[in-house]
């Protein structure tokens, strides 16, 4: 932060900065730091368009974080790189940072995701299957005794299906005790948190499930930024819905995700959506 505000201190403090960055970096980032340090000593740059100094360090870190799919941290780092370059009049590094930010937006928030969100036929099909499954599960004695079905949304994205489940839970025939949503993309997970907060404040739920009322119970939706295959949970779920099906069916790793979910996360009499 000192170097960002007082760039002229770079010659005096850059070694201390790099030591601190190295100490704080995890094992996945250290090879990139070593490559950058070597290229810096040789007078070259591994970051396309970087001119050197603090902007170059931030550009390198942003690129490394993006490669690790740590998108939120990458966005922050690249924005700081652009600001640092602007302060010292380094137009080349600023342009490189802005270009990297633009590319990262397309990478972290792919355009197809928004087309999918607006596919009402697809969304209605999921909502209908979820409603039918919850109605059937509500008839099971163990689900009744537990106060409702425990539901897991794998690959929640912006939280749409988790909210659908929450709205369905208000129907007398669809009792839900718990909703857990997980998303491995931290940028989408951040969007999901905002979506849930917006619905708590009174935004209407989509009409494709027959309701435009607020979603006052969004606190019942727990959100985790993680792959479902990395979840270590003490309980199993009665209903799991997994919107990880792309146009090619298996391109998003649906098969391995579904197998793991059925083996580790689904209760013996539970339901997975989609299913054949």
Image (cartoon, rainbow, N blue to C red):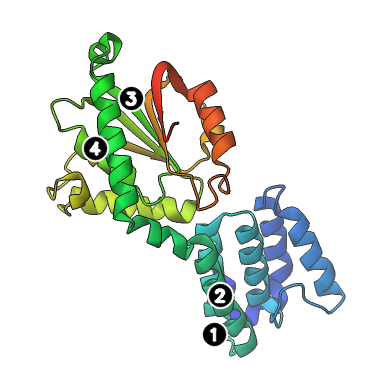
Where does label 3 land, which residue? 150
Under tag 3, what secondary structure? strand
Marks 1 and 2 in Cβ contact (< 8 Å): yes
- The reply, left or right, for residue 31 in relation to residue 193 is right
Which residue of the protein is positioned furthest toward the front in this rendering? 276
Q: Where is residue 201 in the image (x, y as percent from the top left)?
A: 17, 52
Marks 1 and 4 in Cβ contact (< 8 Å): no
Where does label 1 land, which residue? 87
Indicate which disc, 2 or 4, sits on the residue closer to the N terminus: 2
Q: How many C-alpha atoms fall within 10 Å of the one at disc 1: few (<14), some, or many (≥20)?
A: some
Q: How many C-alpha atoms fall within 10 Å of the one at disc 4: few (<14), some, or many (≥20)?
A: many
Q: Is residue 37 above or below residue 184?
A: below
Of residues 164 and 82, the one nearer the viewer is 164
Q: Can residue 205 be seen in this view?
A: no
- The reply, left or right, for residue 65 in relation to residue 156 is right
Q: Residue at x 59, y 54 (%)?
A: 69
Q: Position of residue 178 (x, y in %)?
A: 30, 28
Q: Where, by quadrant of the figure, is residue 171 drawn?
A: top left
Q: Indicate which disc residue 4 carries.
A: 2
Q: In which quarter of the image is the C terminus?
A: top left
Q: Position of residue 148 (x, y in %)?
A: 25, 21
């Amino acid at each position: 932060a000192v170097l960002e505000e007082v760039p002229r201190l770079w010659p005096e403090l850059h070694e201390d900065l790099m030591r601190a960055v190295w100490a704080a970096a995890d094992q996945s980032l250290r090879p990139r730091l070593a490559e950058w340090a070597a290229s810096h000593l040789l007078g070259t740059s591994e970051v396309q368009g970087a001119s050197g100094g603090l902007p170059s360090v931030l550009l390198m870190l942003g690129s490394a974080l993006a490669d690790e799919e740590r998108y939120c941290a990458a966005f922050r780092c690249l924005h700081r790189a652009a600001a640092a370059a602007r302060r010292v009049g380094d137009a080349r590094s600023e342009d490189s940072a802005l270009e990297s930010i633009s590319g990262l937006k397309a990478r972290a928030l792919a355009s197809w995701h928004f087309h999918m969100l607006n596919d009402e036929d697809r969304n209605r099909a999921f909502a209908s299957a979820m409603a039918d499954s919850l109605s059937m599960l509500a008839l099971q004695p163990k689900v009744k005794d537990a106060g409702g079905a425990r539901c897991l949304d794998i690959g929640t994205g912006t939280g749409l299906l988790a909210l659908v489940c929450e709205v369905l839970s208000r129907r007398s025939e669809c009792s839900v005790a718990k909703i857990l949503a997980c998303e491995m993309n931290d940028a989408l997970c951040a969007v999901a948190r905002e979506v849930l907060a917006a619905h708590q404040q009174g935004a209407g739920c989509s009409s494709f499930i027959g309701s435009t009322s607020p979603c006052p119970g969004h606190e019942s939706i727990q959100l985790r930024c993680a792959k479902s295959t990395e979840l270590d949970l003490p309980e199993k779920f009665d209903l799991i819905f997994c919107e990880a099906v792309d146009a090619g069916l298996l391109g998003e790793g649906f098969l391995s995700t579904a197998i793991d979910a059925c083996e580790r996360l689904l209760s013996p009499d539970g339901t997975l959506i989609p299913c054949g």
